[in-house]
Amino acid sequence: MSSDQTPTAPPADSPTSPFHAERSARDEAPQFALPLVVHMERDAPPARTDALETAARAVLVMLSDERSLGEGEWAQVMRDWQDARIRKVVRRARGAEWRRAEALPGITVMGESAEVRVFPPVPVDVWPKELAKLQVSGTDLDDPRPPADADPEVPVLWLNPELTMSAGKAMAQAGHGAQLAWWALSDEERAVWHKAGFPLAVRTAPAALWPGLTTSGLPLVRDAGFTEIAPGSATVVAGHPALRLI
């Protein structure tokens, strides 16, 4: 694996994929999780779709940050994380909890109403105390109005319309989809997306279109089934203009 580039992953249905539900050699490697913390004050929760999109961008920002590449300070743990299962854990914080989380090394990404901080991967059983005490379950959000149709020129992460997921679970799945899209792009295509600030949309796929999306050849996330949904469930199809042309 090159130390100066983001690695390319096998297809999600491959036995060697980090998103393949069956046990593989990736399960024998030390396991890490990418922490994402959403800022969620009681009187001002973010909109659900904006939180999902902000989480997905946060993953892309972490993958492309110079500290995650080459000899950067986060590069080794990023490689270790990507060599095993690609786990992401979303927690929520408010008030002093959020301020303590902000003090840890990481990157805060802003949406229209959402604020998400992403941290370098940590061992699944050894979290910083400031993050370990944050709530992970029950993170749910609503959209005050239905999201507008996605811009056809913008990458779209399509959610499975047949699954019910908490906002936290869906944020992690959107992050998986963004990561698979990133891996599938060329270096030049990644650079263009990065320079534009990682525009993207997260939308629930129309039920009639979902079967075709899952067989389209676009990157497909299948969940390992650690939480909420059954192992092997298809959760996200990652559409990107560059990939849709293939």
Image: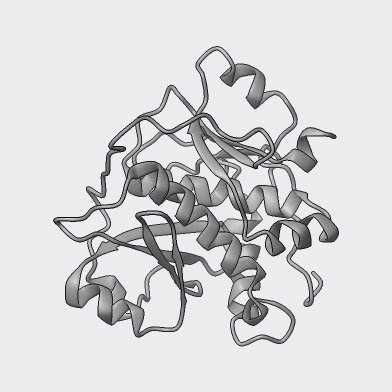
Residue at 51% in and 40% down: 202
From the viewer's perspective, tell me whether residue 72 is left or right of residue 123: right
Rendered position, 84 above or below 80: above
Its colouring scheme is one colour
In percent of width and height, residue 62 lies at 57, 69
Q: Is residue 17 in view?
A: no
* Quarter-of-image position of residue 3: bottom right
In percent of width and height, residue 92 lies at 27, 61
Residue at 36% in and 56% down: 114
Rendered position, 93 above or below 8: below
* Residue found at the far top of this picture: 208
Q: Quadrant of the C terminus?
A: top right
In percent of width and height, residue 179 lies at 62, 53
Q: Is residue 186 in view?
A: yes
Considering depth in this image, is 245 or 8 the residue closer to the camera? 245
* Residue found at the far left of this picture: 43
From the viewer's perspective, tell me whether residue 38 is left or right of residue 40: right
From the viewer's perspective, tell me whether residue 130 is left or right of residue 1: left
Q: How many marks?
A: 0
Residue at 26% in and 44% down: 140
In percent of width and height, residue 38 lies at 33, 61
* Quarter-of-image position of residue 8: bottom right
Q: Quadrant of the N terminus?
A: bottom right
Residue at 32% in and 77% down: 101
Rendered position, 116 above or below 174: below
